[in-house]
Image (cartoon, grey):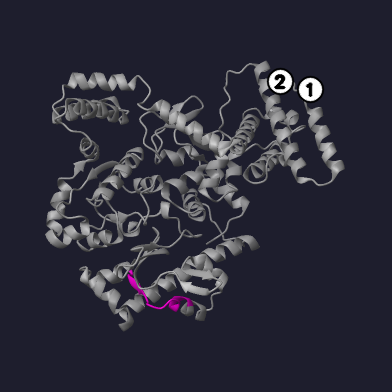
Amino acid sequence: MPWYSEEQIEEVRSRSDIVSVIGRYVRLKRTGSGYTGLCPFHNEKTPSFHVNPARQMYKCFGCGVGGNVLTFVMEYENLTFPEAMEMLAEQAGIDLPKQEMTAQQKQQEGIRLTLLEINKKAARYYFALLKSPRGKAGYDYLTGRGLTDETILHFGLGFAGQGGGELYQYLKKEGYSDQILKETGLFKMDERGVYDKFWNRVMFPIMDVNNRVIGFGGRVMGDAKPKYLNSPETKIFDKSRNLFGLNYAKRGKRNNMILCEGYMDVIALHQAGFTNAVASLGTAFTEQQANLIRRYTDEVLLTYDSDGAGVKAAMRAIPMLRRAGITGKVIHMEPYKDPDEFIKNLGADEFEKRIEEAQNSFFFEIEVTKRNYSMSDPDQKTKFIHEIARKLLVFEDKIQRNNYLEAVAARYNIKTEDLQQLVVRYGNQMPSGYEEVMEERQQERLRKGRKKESREGISYSYRLLLSWLIEEPQLFRQISQWIKPEDFEEGLYRTVAKELYEQMEKDELEPARIIGHFTEVEEQNKVASMFQTSFGSEIQAEEKKKAITDLILKIKEHSLERQAGEVTDLNELQKLVQQKKMLQGAVKLHIS
């Protein structure tokens, strides 16, 4: 993977106008000195996504994402930092020669590439073992489940042997150290020795969207527990941000995706011609996975198991899909439990019919909710109708909500006017159980202690001061007399403060350039949030003076307290205590 210098990153960023780039994905409307639009990263009806051409930054005040043009491309297109650089450079007509990495960068990139290399070799090893006489148990299991040799090859399925260290011995002979093998998550290492994590299991390689093996799932032969075992999270494997089969499904010709619960469901559907099937990776479906799917489709067909656990999983996934702006439908597979069983017994044509008959996910939610009430009991039926009214509030768009309201009223024999009145009533008051929820959250916060609250408070003060400096750079000379980059806690805040102070010393303020120093989307979002904290544009001079003074005092006092906790010399400690005492009344600002 190439590495790019700060000069190259800045050239690509500065020559890629953020309004033009984002405008290819989002319909933007001019509002004052900036632009607004519907956020592409979460579902919303009222625009909360803002693009600032002067700062070359964007921010969504609904879901919190933000950054520069590189951040947007990485997040929207699901690209790595170098991939986003290459894409924008090509569009801007910039030639990007590769640069030499620093020693630390080479080390980290070397580890990542080595892990991918080891996973690839492990996948080949498992596949070869499956095809050998020693893999007969695994091969018989897969063919017994109806899989063809072509499908086994297509998904690279394999078998982990009966022994406890076969893969380890193989990779040791390939020249890998215990230190790097430990990073793969494929082995257990303790005082007794080293053992393969997977053994006596059919193996499912997990690939990212670029067809690289990033982890494994293993199904045990026999009745041992756990039935399915998955790779732990590593430097290349994040369960919440990947989906099994997405590398194939994203190339599918259908305009939707089928969301399954297990690996075998995905494989069975692909073999039957439904190559748009994906599954979460041994964990519950996540918001990140919903947003990942949104990049490829706006409709998902849920095929979770028809048992209690499957219904519960579907009920949890549907709101996530809705928040991501995805239309959800539920495929009913009765009398069979899952897609794998259904395909084996009724075939692809019948499954196609079930797709055409898929139930709207909101009506599915209502039907599941109905099971909790006795419709023959007037009180129970009343409670059910009230719950329907509350559920209808998930639709922010009035026309959409009214359409659903009319359909629900007709289906459950409720007077439309009565249901409409209930919806309006619940829409004009706090949600049911609001007080209990808030009390629970308050108690939870108290249980976690004041330390976290204090930490969150100082973090907010950091963000507020940084935002103020960017909004009104003329304040820098006064503020910098009291607050230095070293007064921010080590880590992201201090790094950003240092970069910002250097820019202001040179009178070259470019916040978007600071974001370009970070290559991970999460870090870029955090940095962007430091420059977007609102403090009110209508604040008067005296109020502003007091607010900034209070910020300076809070940050400086926190800095001195932190230093005091680190020093061991009594004289140094006394100096810090004296500095803190002298602070009050010493900070005098001139603000107009």
The structure residue drawn at horizontal position 70% and vertical position 18%, both measured from the top left corner, is: 592
Q: Give the structural element (helix, strand or loop) at label 1.
A: loop
Real-space Cα separation, disc 2 to disc 1, in angstroms: 16 Å
Q: Is residue 129 above or below residue 536?
A: below
Q: Which residue is mark 1?
A: 585
- Amino acid at circle 1: Gly
Left or right: where 557 falls relative to 185: right
- Amino acid at circle 2: Ile
Q: Give the structural element (helix, strand or loop) at label 2.
A: loop
Residue 260 point in image, percent of width and height: 28, 53
Mark 2 packing: few (<14 Cα in 10 Å), some, or many (20+)? some
> Which of these two is toward me, 446 or 272?
446
User: Is residue 162 in the magenta section?
Assistant: yes
Residue 97 point in image, percent of width and height: 56, 60
Give the magenta part as a residue range. 156-168
Q: Which residue is mark 2?
A: 591
